[in-house]
Image: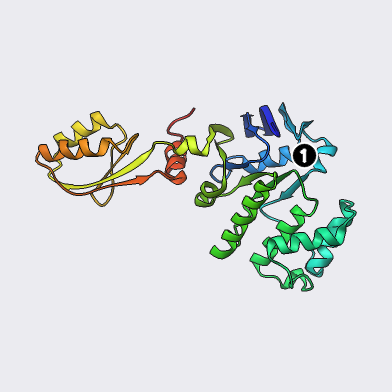
Amino acid sequence: MIIETHNLTKKYGDKTACDKINLSVEAGQVYGFLGRNGAGKSTCIKILTGLVFPTSGSGTVLGKPLGDVSARQKMGYLPELFRYQDWMTGLDLLNFHAQIIKINNTKEQVNRVLKLVGLEGQEKYKVGSYSKGMQQRIGLASALLSNPELIFFDEPTSALDPIGRRDVRDIIVSLRNEGMTVFLNSHLLSEVEAVCDSVTIIHKGTVVKSARMDELLMNKILLTIRAKGLTEELVAKLKKQFDSLQKLADGSYTILLNDYEQIPSLATSLTSDGVTLYELTPHRETLETVFLQIVGEEGLPLKQS
């Protein structure tokens, strides 16, 4: 495992930011780290990158104990909130970072990351003149400058337009294809679903779900039902058969199914009970719906595993 932690805990006085976090991240994958604001994600990332020491627990990153300096040399990190020197050009900034991390082939690496993040031709402009999206891209370039084995992205698409988000998504996929491990924290669940191989969801500092993406969404079908004649008795009957039954504000119902083969028998059962069907539409469950089921729309965990 490229990252492994055991009961990782961080307290600030009486406040517990992370509580007994257990992570196992395989090399060469994109790993999604999800949770609401204040769930403890950024604190965990700071511990893994050696910026903060845990109160208790242990772990390894790149085969080294947490905080090991030699492991940091093989990491890249783009924090959610960062600010570079406005008076520097993009090229000056990358050359400066290359000197800090003692890169030998500076020109080659700088040109590589400029091309990778789409800033070729913009490197001689001052960072202070960059748009928010361009500043995000120069941050990505800085994090990738050392060609790390493991990179941490904390909300890497927060300032980007849809095209920019797609470009970052393509960059993440290309990094994985080159064998790099990407640890991704993002609130854009559709982006996470598109690129991540595995995810961990934390809530109030505690892990509530860890799974491979395909397992998390496997065999889960959200069925929308619009019908006339669904009496209270029939709804109660459906509820006994499908405990996931929910009524939406527009009067329709949704049910979680494990198999498409359940749909014809459900349609037959409803019509035989005198129900007039207007719509019976299956949708593959998304990461967003799974996230809301686990964490809850009001922030209260609904189930744990």
Measured as percent of width and height from the top left, residue 78 is found at 71, 52
Quarter of the view holding residue 109? bottom right
Q: Quadrant of the N terminus?
A: top right
Is residue 2 positioned above or below 101 on the image?
Answer: above
In the image, is 166 to the left or to the right of 110? left
Q: Is residue 115 above or below residue 65?
A: below
Residue 176 image offset from top left, x and y in percent: 65, 46
Across and down, in percent, residue 153 comes to 66, 49
Q: Is residue 40 above or below residue 21?
A: below
The residue that appears at 62% across and 46% down in the rendered structure is 184
Give the residue displayed 82% in from the left and 63% down from the top. Answer: 93
- Residue 41 shows up from this direction: yes
Who is closer to the viewer here, 72 or 74?
74
Q: Residue at x 44, y 31 (%)?
A: 303
Residue 125 at x, y percent in the picture? 77, 73
Q: Residue drawn at (13%, 41%), measured in percent from left and top?
A: 271
The colour scheme used here is rainbow
Q: Is residue 65 above or below residue 28?
A: above
Secondary structure beneath dot 1 equals loop
Q: Amino acid at mark 1?
A: Gly
> Label 1, on which residue?
50
